[in-house]
Image (tube, rainbow, N blue to C red):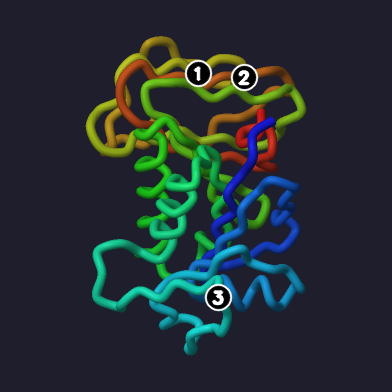
């Protein structure tokens, strides 16, 4: 079972999804530090420019960056986790709030997927991940909706199995939302792309996707 790097940002935070285990790494990205403090959780590292938090935290586990930078605070946290050998990332506080930040965090998922890593954005009853030149599998316990979107260049060889609306070796484009609002059927299912990147949104939890 793989260890997970938890990256907590300043967006909408759903505490029920925060469940680190021994061996996991917890990084607060700027305003995420306030969320963790609110629930009595400790961050292994706090980083960012701290404009959302409004002050630079005290302590030795703090790394401050200038506001004028190319990376968001969330992707700084992700890069730190990668540098420490983590390949699985749970991004909390990365949905809601400013739409531009939500889109940036979805791009971060694709960035991870292109580096043989996987991240999941967790919101209220909904999760988002990305897959590049590979596949995702879901257990039979999943229910509700699942949507598949192309992000970037056309995605080739897209196959959806075990879902209400299957596809086989299809081509998805970023301008056509063909994969929206598919449904789980209470059986194992699979999303596969031969070439390109897909963003997958589903109802439910993410532990299976990250630690499986």
The image quarter containing residue 198 is top left
Residue visible at 24% across and 64% down in the picture = 70
Q: Which mark is residue 60?
A: 3
Residue 150 vertical position relative to residue 37 in the rendered view, above or below: above
User: Which one is earlier in the sequence, the residue at label 1 or at label 2?
Assistant: 1
Residue 115: image x %, image y %? Answer: 37, 34
User: Which one is earlier in the sequence, the residue at label 2 or at label 3?
Assistant: 3
Instruction: Say how many tags the image has.
Output: 3
Kindly give the residue lying farthest to the top in the view shown. 168
Quickly name the residue at label 2: 189
Residue visible at 61% across and 30% down in the picture = 183
Secondary element type, mark 1: strand
Residue 72: image x %, image y %? Answer: 35, 64
Mark pair 1, 2: CA separation: 8 Å
Pick the quarter of the image with the C terminus. top right
Mark pair 1, 3: CA separation: 47 Å
Residue 125: image x %, image y %? Answer: 67, 51
Residue visible at 52% across and 42% down in the picture = 86
Front residue (pair 91, 176): 91
Left or right, 166 with respect to 103, comes to: right
Q: Which mark is residue 160?
A: 1
Residue visible at 49% across and 37% down in the picture = 118
């Amino acid at each position: 079972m793989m260890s997970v790097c938890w990256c907590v940002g300043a967006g909408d935070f759903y505490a029920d999804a925060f469940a680190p285990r021994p061996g996991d790494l917890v990084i607060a990205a700027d305003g995420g530090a306030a969320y963790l403090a609110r629930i009595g959780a400790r961050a292994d590292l706090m980083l960012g420019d701290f404009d959302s938090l409004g002050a630079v935290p005290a302590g030795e586990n703090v790394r401050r960056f200038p506001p004028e930078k190319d990376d968001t605070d969330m992707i700084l946290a992700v890069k730190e986790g990668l540098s420490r050998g983590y390949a699985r990332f749970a991004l909390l506080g990365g949905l809601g709030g400013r739409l531009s930040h939500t889109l940036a965090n979805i791009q971060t998922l694709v960035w991870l997927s292109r580096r043989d890593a996987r991240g999941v954005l967790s919101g209220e009853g909904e999760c988002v991940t990305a897959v590049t030149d590979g596949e995702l599998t879901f257990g039979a316990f999943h229910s509700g909706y699942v949507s598949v979107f192309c992000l970037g260049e056309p995605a080739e060889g897209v196959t959806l199995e075990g879902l209400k609306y299957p596809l086989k070796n299809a081509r998805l484009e970023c301008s056509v939302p063909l994969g929206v609002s598919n449904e789980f059927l209470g059986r194992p299912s699979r999303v596969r792309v031969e070439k390109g990147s897909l963003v997958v949104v589903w109802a439910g939890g993410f532990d299976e996707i990250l630690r499986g």
